[in-house]
Image: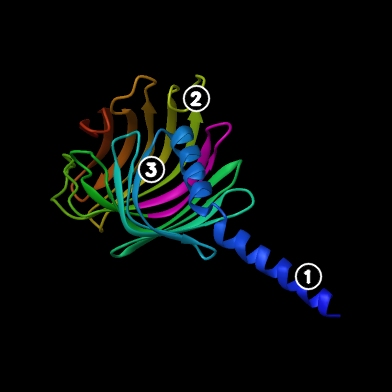
Amino acid sequence: MRWVLNGLLLIALYLIFLVIRFPYETLVERSIATVEQATGAAISWTPESAGPLGVHMRDLDIQLASGAHLAFGEARLHPTWSGLVATLSQEGGIASVRLSHRELQLNLKDVEVDTASTELGITRLTGDLLYDLQSHGGSGDLGMKIPNFQAPLPIPEIPIELGAKITIQRLGGESAARAGSTVTAETRILGGQEFSAEGTVQITTQAGGGSPMLNGSLRYEAQQNRGTLTIGGTWENPTWSVNPNS
């Protein structure tokens, strides 16, 4: 009987050793590298701790291919058999991430984003996004709060809320970093009871990099008039043309 107990004790000690020595941080780093390669994003962080309860990071920064930037003060990541799950926290906002070999799922709740756009500025994002790591396509529903919208709309400067049902399509190339992609956004803009607009906007990234190109048309209604908004230029420096109905 004693030898059985000794054997079980040795097995338990060996399992504990494996758990302690398991390369949690390495697995997380590989998963992050997969996301970077598939999306063209650049991700940096400061390691805090790693163990059976997960990997703890601080000062997690995400620079998207569009130039937009997200910063999280704290991140907790847990490796899984197929990838990882993570919770990213910032002041007033939280993002939940689930990554597998096949897809990336994001849930955002009031996450602050520096859009790198002269007119959108710093916004708050809420919504869900599903991205296929193999086809480099995806879809989602996003809501954006824009406290200082700088576009030349036919209304006074007021906070704007933007909602969009988006579809992501790859244009071609060997990898997402080398290929362009098009984001089609079925967009609705609300400015209180004073302004509304809806229509389709396409955001096209280029294989060589640079700020994505914009192309779209929105039908708008304001207190004094209604008409069409035409959007062009780039994500960083968009152009707007207001065409009131005659």
The first of marks 2 and 1 along the sequence is 1
- Magenta segment, prevailing SS (helix, strand or loop): strand
**What is the residue that sits farthest to the front in this orientation?**
3
Residue type of the residue flagged with mark 3: Thr
Q: Mark 1 points at which residue?
A: 7
**Which of the 4 quarters of the picture holds residue 58?**
bottom left
Q: Do the residues labelled 2 and 3 touch (CB within 8 Å)?
A: no
Q: Mark 3 points at which residue?
A: 187
Report the quarter where the C terminus lies. Answer: top left
**What is the residue that sits farthest to the left in this orientation?**
156
The first of marks 2 and 3 along the sequence is 2
Q: Residue 229, how many percent across, how many down? A: 27, 35
Report the disc number at residue 233.
none
Answer whether residue 141 is magenta in the image. Answer: yes
Answer whether residue 229 is magenta in the image. Answer: no
Q: Residue 22, how many percent across, how many down? A: 57, 55
Residue type of the residue flagged with mark 1: Gly
Question: Distance from label 2 to label 3 (Cα)?
Answer: 28 Å
Q: Are marks 1 and 3 in contact (CB under 8 Å)?
A: no
Report the quarter where the N terminus lies. Answer: bottom right
The range drawn in magenta is 126-143
The first of marks 1 and 3 along the sequence is 1
Q: Residue 91, how many percent across, how many down? A: 28, 64
Left or right placement of residue 226 versus residue 205 in this view: left
**What is the residue that sits farthest to the right in this orientation?**
1
Q: Residue 30, how many percent across, how many down? A: 51, 42
Q: Mark 2 points at which residue?
A: 175
- Secondary structure, mark 1, is helix
Left or right placement of residue 245 versus residue 178 in this view: left
